[in-house]
Amino acid sequence: MSSSRASRALRGDPRAWFGAGVVILLLLLAVTAPVVARHDPVRIDLINQLSPPSGRHWLGTDVQGRDVWARLVYGARISLSVGIVSQAIALALGISLGLIAGFYGRWVDELVMRLADITLAFPTLLLLIAMNAALQPSLGVVFVTIGVVGWAGMARLVRGQVLVVRQLEYVQASRALGGRDLRIILIHVLPGVLAPVIIAVTLGMAGAIIAESSLSFLGLGVQPPTPSWGSMIADGRDLSQLRHAPWTSLFPGLAIGAAVLGFNLLGDALRDALDPRTIRAAIPRGAGLPDIARP
């Protein structure tokens, strides 16, 4: 599909508008957090603990008197940074190994795909829990573990696209003219697989946000007092808080839902606009979600 036709398809798709709007709003909140937060997200104020939403505390306070709005805004920084960095790691590993496996085939393809099968054989969340439990939980560990776990799906996607692209006439002509493998891969093959990769990264952002929130909820992700949407839900899961101060866990839960919905709608719109036939088959709906969250 041509770029102009894809642009028209995106402009006419309400999913793209809504998804892009949510993503842009989250990015703006994350960037301007020191300005819009109004309060220190880690400042404890026991006098005002579990205060309901008001003009002073827009979304109320938690059990330690910390402002929920401030923690929510700064938590957006954590979620988006985890999504961006982890997807960058998965992208680097997945594209590199997928290109090599698809282009050279034979034993190289067999080795890479068997490693991918081993990685995908484990439930995503359980594998993340095991890796983070074995290491010292921190933000850096979350970056690496989510990125490393996500490489396998990216590699399989790229490898499948390379198997198609390498048979095209212009790639065969370049090889017949004596082009070096590295040049052929970078100049001719890589551009042909970028469209589904961009869509997979967009969908993968949603999966990374859910994975980070799940780890933080279990105490294996971002460590206190750093605000994280998952840890905010964990702090408010006490039954008495759910009854008398539901805002402590309701608003971070809504933030996670909005972020995941925004990225998935944007990814679905990109998938249908760029190539509704081949990419829809390569990237099914819900591909960016971890196993426990897929419809």
Image (cartoon, grey):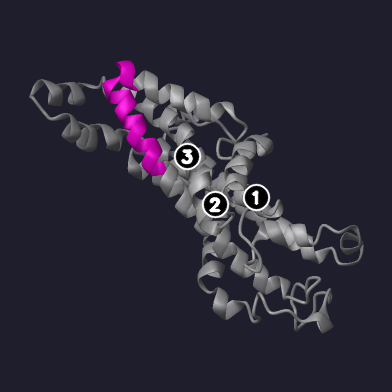
SS of the residue under disc 2? helix
Q: Is residue 162 left or right of residue 272?
A: left
Residue 215: mark? 1
> Residue most toward the top?
106
Could you tell me the amino acid type at mark 2?
Val
Question: Is disc 1 in contact with disc 2, using a CB cutoff of under 8 Å?
Answer: yes
Span shown in magenta: 91-108
Which residue lies under the disc numbered 2? Answer: 142
- Decide which of tag 3 and tag 1 comes sooner along the chain: 3
Mark 2 burial class by Cα count in 10 Å: few <14, some 14-19, many 20+: many
Which one is in front, 229 or 145? 145
**Residue 168 at x, y = what percent?**
25, 22
Q: Could you tell me how far apart the alpha carbons at marks 3 and 1 are, in whole angstroms?
A: 22 Å
For the stretch drawn in magenta, what is the main secondary structure? helix
For residue 274, what is the image quadrant?
Answer: top left
Side of 172 where 293 appears, left or right: right
- The numbered mark at residue 101 is none
From this view, report whether residue 43 is shown above or below residue 225. below
Q: Depth-wise, is mark 2 or mark 3 nearer the camera?
A: 2
- Front position in the image: 77 or 122: 122
